Amino acid sequence: MVATLFFAIAFLSILIILLWHLYFLFFQYFPPKNTFFKIKTKNKFLALTFDDGPNPLTTLEILEILKKYNLKATFFQIGKNIQKHPQITGRIFKEGHIIGNHLFNHSFFVSFSFPKLEKDLIKTQDLIFQIIKKRPKFFRPPYFFVSPAILKIVKKQNLILIGSTAFSIFEPDQPPASLMVFEILKKISPGAILTFHEGCDTKMGNYRQTTKAVSKIIPKILEKGYKILPLSDLLETPPYF
């Protein structure tokens, strides 16, 4: 009985992971309008993105790593976290990085209700505008989930939906940095959008293994002959309205 349950759980876990990968592959090759899970290019260019900030335990270290290599990234920020740490959002912008909208509460279920989604998105847009005097054009839905309501809001608000090509499915558990680096390096290719997390949604938390992974993976990417460019450069479009 125990063995049967174990194998059933293992099978279900493998099936979920397989479907998850197929989901990302589908949107990489068959994206809806103004949706990018990967950017079409033959050049060895890629973009670096960060989600779920600002988080003082992680974001400031990430900024120092990016400054060391003179790189610019895109930070998809949660409205509730911005309210707690507006000065960090301001610093990210002043240092030349891009601020993207990651909704106010990082709720998965808001993606199914257009009125709630629109309210959540606009609230975050307005909050970001108060700090940087610009409204983001780049939007990343929580968990990269693309629903009919998400596509509707992208069209109505003239946004650009940004998914991801490469990230670590183990990152929420904060495994050793070397494991995350190994996992992501396997997935890089021209036009890839790499994703790390500054924290865990509105709970934030200590993501020190992520900062270690970022510091390790950047030189490895550069050694492979890739250039890490701002998302706006790869998409050839301004990041703000």
Image: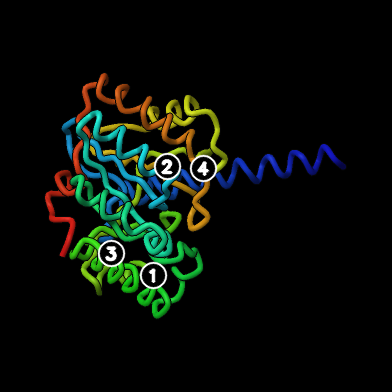
**Mark 2 → mark 3, Cα distance in angstroms:** 20 Å
**Mark 2 → mark 1, Cα distance in angstroms:** 33 Å
Task: In the rendered view, tell whether residue 153 sits above or below residue 9.
Answer: below
Helix, strand or loop under label 2:
loop
Q: Nearer the viewer, mark 1 or mark 3?
A: 3
Q: Indicate the position of residue 119 as horizontal and vertical percent values.
A: 37, 77
Q: Amino acid at mark 1?
A: Pro
Chain-order first, disc 4 or disc 3: 3
Chain-order first, disc 2 or disc 1: 2
Q: Indicate the position of residue 152 as horizontal and vertical percent values.
A: 32, 72
Mark carried by residue 148:
1
Helix, strand or loop under label 4:
loop
**Mark 4 → mark 3, Cα distance in angstroms:** 24 Å
Mark carried by residue 58:
2
Categorize mark 4 by other alpha carbons within 10 Å: few (<14), some (14-19), many (20+): some
Dots 2 and 4: beta carbons under 8 Å? yes
Mark carried by residue 124:
none
Dividing the picture into quadrants, the one containing residue 64 is top left
Q: Amino acid at mark 3?
A: Ile
Q: Which residue is mark 3?
A: 128
Camera-nearest residue between 97 and 169: 97
Q: Which residue is mark 4?
A: 206
Helix, strand or loop under label 3:
helix
